[in-house]
Amino acid sequence: MIRVTIYNEFIHEQSDEIVKKVYPDGIHTLLRQELEDDEITVRTFTLDTVEEITDEVLEKTDVIIWWGHVRHMQVPDEVAGRVKEAVLKGMGAIFLHSAHHSKPFKGLMGTSCNLTWREHGDRELVWVCNPAHPIAAGIDRYIDLAHEEAYGEPFGVPEPDELVFIGHFEHGEVFRSGCCYYRERGRVFYFQPGHETYESLKHPDVIRVIKNAIHWAYPTARVSELTCPHVEKPID
Amino acid sequence: MIRVTIYNEFIHEQSDEIVKKVYPDGIHTLLRQELEDDEITVRTFTLDTVEEITDEVLEKTDVIIWWGHVRHMQVPDEVAGRVKEAVLKGMGAIFLHSAHHSKPFKGLMGTSCNLTWREHGDRELVWVCNPAHPIAAGIDRYIDLAHEEAYGEPFGVPEPDELVFIGHFEHGEVFRSGCCYYRERGRVFYFQPGHETYESLKHPDVIRVIKNAIHWAYPTARVSELTCPHVEKPID
Amino acid sequence: MIRVTIYNEFIHEQSDEIVKKVYPDGIHTLLRQELEDDEITVRTFTLDTVEEITDEVLEKTDVIIWWGHVRHMQVPDEVAGRVKEAVLKGMGAIFLHSAHHSKPFKGLMGTSCNLTWREHGDRELVWVCNPAHPIAAGIDRYIDLAHEEAYGEPFGVPEPDELVFIGHFEHGEVFRSGCCYYRERGRVFYFQPGHETYESLKHPDVIRVIKNAIHWAYPTARVSELTCPHVEKPID
Amino acid sequence: MIRVTIYNEFIHEQSDEIVKKVYPDGIHTLLRQELEDDEITVRTFTLDTVEEITDEVLEKTDVIIWWGHVRHMQVPDEVAGRVKEAVLKGMGAIFLHSAHHSKPFKGLMGTSCNLTWREHGDRELVWVCNPAHPIAAGIDRYIDLAHEEAYGEPFGVPEPDELVFIGHFEHGEVFRSGCCYYRERGRVFYFQPGHETYESLKHPDVIRVIKNAIHWAYPTARVSELTCPHVEKPID
């Protein structure tokens, strides 16, 4: 059983009428419903309970999924720090959409993670540029999303270790929409779809990509500690 | 002085009325006119003279630019082989548009270099995704090309060492339009614009990118031979 | 069942008394014995039968292992070409030791694959530099080989997509001993140990690495053809 | 004129008799003397003055060089943060030896930057594995250092964008000794030699590498601000 932990700040869904209609029980609940299956079990946290994402919780998490937007700064540094450290020890991590600016993602990238953005409900085609990648399994040439917030290059991240998707926005932008990173023992996937006012996170291909990413990011070489070992004697 | 050699197969410009109008003296002549300046000198070859691209010519070439399309197969293996070897020894190389299927490019990549293509004169926006890269110097957010052949992902090449541009085509495709590769001593740049029936190669930003790429690909660590040295004694 | 095909040129083992003692039935036979298990089945070819490595054989091969040294040039271009093409379509490939100069490996890399070499039976420590990588699973800090041919940098290959091992030779050299490449649909692993006069290929850790690499290279997104599709209509 | 800023914590040289003899005026002073030439001008800071590394100083710095060891934690987060931000905006950065654990380097990498270490005065051969790289210009096959602290793999950093040097330690370890990273607008070079009790930083080849790295890291696309721009209208 793959143990997935979802963090969703859960602000828009309570304060904005449009979002409330799209994700009435919150993005975390929708994702839990869509992702749980014979192999995946999910527990969820929101900004209200973010401090409950303790080391103990993270040790029992195989892959964390992160969605945040307007309250990144209210996630305590301690929580963000332990998520980052858990990734370096081997936990998988998937950052969705506006989580590009979340503390754990920025900490893992070491860069600003800036981008350009424009919100006009553009149709987006999310193209597979690496069809051999397990995260693209089962996806045809592209995912067709009726409406998304346009994210545009330049995306201020390190060159991805593997680029899987590139997004095409109707009114002009392109974006590296699916980026894989290896960071010490952990695997990190950034996936651009998922604006709170649109239906993208209900799209079966988006769910399939997230499921694929869960399997891809599942830890295979996890350690309990990050050490900097002193070797006392020369190699025999 | 940077010594640039241009190869253009020069078939369409003689056989197709539309192309004849766009590039009446051939793509090679247009490029020579646009590229020559105080720092760059150019000589040109076409399919008729491709066998004259000898080792001696290549040794006196700092950067080669290659445009071909319907006659890739008529470039002799010997010529393609010596171009590839010259690159591995340090000569720079720039492959334009349909040269993705040229023998030297395929030989250097080790892959099929396939892509999808569609020809409806789409407007293309060539986005800068790596604004820190010297090849993007002086380019704003994107290059705006009135018409281009649409090239689409997946592009069957190794993950670029540095990705500089991503193309956005009006009717849906995206493409990794500017890709840098380090191959032993040589630097290789693939640049997607340049279909024979359109004006892209006259666009000042396209010329600027090619000039930037010439400077970027200029050899700095060239060798006269590729060796596999036998070391006779252990390191002292 | 993973279907592995081993090619071993099988020259030294018949012509050189020392090698005959180390690998009396040939490197291919030793590898078959060591690799076959509940999940892996092996068939073998040698230079004498290399032309029998047909497209049909390759279609029924999940991962090919290649060992060659003094007779690389006698492998017909057609055979090398179809091995390369099978890799691009998704077949896994593992190149051992002196196969760095084999035709299929050079074709896939696009470079000379040169290195420096020195033969004094140095002890080699093959260090794990990427302990999170599945190919390093079960290996401690390093593999300790009593004797190996010293291979030294610079290794004339593209920057590996993932570097897993670095070799330390007693009398001075270092070498990127375990290099992963993604080439279109296929996965390629180069592994440096395996000189014909030493026992490395019998070392349990070397066998474990090769087994790990077989599992890692197992095709997951294979295609029957490499195509460059023409799209007739704009995306709807 | 290239404006270089050197930070050296300057603790060992005042508290340890051996170090005092090797670097009587401090590592920063030695480096300034060795690096200043017709193209390079240097100013220096130590832990005592680290807070004087203000935004204004950084804006007038083209490349920063960082040496620290036992007092990383005493560098204020604010200072480390502004160094990191200056790099992302385009300032070059060179981290020497034990600066692998400095706050700005760890912040830029996003990882633990752990390694194994052993101190027995091993001879080190620092091999060039990428002879085409401008940082290796003028260096023969390897740099021969009489004594160095042994650093060993695994090195807990992201896969380098370009790997230039690999170190070979007499008693067994290997280490990725010269690693290049592109991080948004800035270029980062990590170089392993430079333990405080040995003479490495006086070695002409080490100085040459650092000078090469200064030229390589010189900013070419610096920005005054890191922005995440809102685009108000669709592309025309």
Image (cartoon, coloured by chain):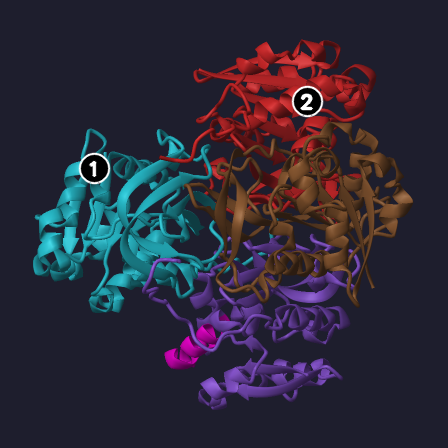
Chain colours: A cyan, B brown, C red, D purple
Q: How many marks?
A: 2
- Visible in this render: residue A192? yes
Chain letter of the residue beneath label 1 in the structure image: A
Residue type at tag 1: Leu
Residue type at tag 2: Gly
Residue occupying image coordinates x 35% and y 64%: D231
Between residue D231 and residue D203, name the one nearer to us: D231
Chain letter of the residue beneath label 2 in the structure image: C
Between residue C99 and residue B80, name the one nearer to us: B80
* Drawn side of residue D14 relative to residue D122, left or right: left
Quadrant for the N terminus of chain C, please. Answer: top left
Q: Which residue is mark 2?
A: C81
Q: Which residue is mark 1?
A: A35
x, y (%) of residue D125?
71, 58
- Visible in this render: residue D166? no
When asked about the image quadrant of residue A4, the answer is top left
The part of the chain drawn in magenta is: D72-87
x, y (%) of residue B201?
64, 51
When asked about the image quadrant of residue A62, the answer is top left
SS under mark 2: helix
x, y (%) of residue A229?
47, 58
